[in-house]
Amino acid sequence: MADEKQHATLIAKGELNRRAFFAKIGLGSLGIAAVGTAGFAYQFLSPNVLYEPSPIVNLGKPEDFAMDTVTMNPDAAIYLVHSAEGYFAMSAVCTHLGCLTAWSQELGIIKCPCHGSEFARTGVKIEGPAPKPLPWLRTWVSEEGDLMVDRSTDIHPLQFLRI
Ligand code: FES
């Protein structure tokens, strides 16, 4: 009887309340679980999108590209060629397995370092395993007078841009 009275006194003082203690632990666990679930739900419902750079490339002023030159833009993986017929842009990505090709000034050809494909400066395949020529890309002059290239739009070859 004395023990029960002593126990009741301790509970009243808030020093020994096992039920309340476990209730607090239970609520805390539920709170942590709710926050974790909300985090996963947010991640699941958010769009899983990769943002790629724009396919439109500004190459600058046409006069910066001297006559009879092949200029590679490695960031955009394209060539800008200025020939007597006009300007044109081509992809610099090999049509075999996608390696980045390189212009050889000495040889006057575009070479792929991976498996040896070679292309004329018009993109026509000369030799090697590449199944297709390098594609020409849509090219135009912006209102500001800059050369623009759309890497996502192939055009038929020999459509020179005359300025
Ligand atoms: S990737 Fe260019 S020849 Fe194979």
Image (tube, rainbow, N blue to C red):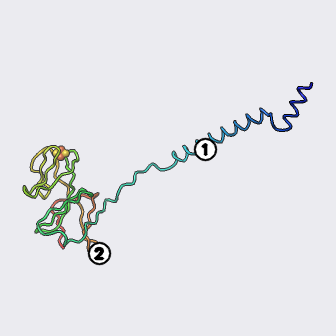
Label 2 sits on a secondary structure element that is loop
The quarter of the displayed image where residue 147 is located: bottom left
Q: Nearer the viewer, residue 133 or 118?
A: 118
Label 1 sits on a secondary structure element that is helix
Q: Nearer the viewer, residue 117 or 23?
A: 23
Considering every residue shown, the one lying at the far right of the view is 1
In this image, 72 relative to 53: left or right?
left
Q: Quadrant of ligand 1?
A: top left
Quadrant location of the C terminus in the rendered image: bottom left
Q: Mark 1 points at which residue?
A: 35
Q: Where is residue 142 in the image (x, y as percent from the top left)?
A: 28, 72
Q: Which mark is residue 71?
A: none
Residue at 17%, 71% in the rendered image: 162
Q: Name the residue under label 2.
A: 144
In this image, 153 relative to 47: left or right?
left
Residue at 16%, 52% in the rendered image: 133
The quarter of the displayed image where residue 138 is located: bottom left
Amino acid at dot 1? Val
Quadrant location of the N terminus in the rendered image: top right
Q: Position of residue 91 (x, y in %)?
A: 21, 56
Question: From what the image shows, is residue 68 above or below residue 33?
Answer: below
Residue at 9%, 50% in the rendered image: 126
The quarter of the displayed image where residue 56 is located: bottom left
Amino acid at dot 2? Glu
Considering every residue shown, the one lying at the far left of the view is 107
Residue density around tag 2, few if under 14, some if 14–19, many if 20 or more, within 10 Å: few
Q: Where is residue 35 in the image (x, y as percent from the top left)?
A: 61, 44
Q: Which of 125 and 12 is in front in this view?
A: 12
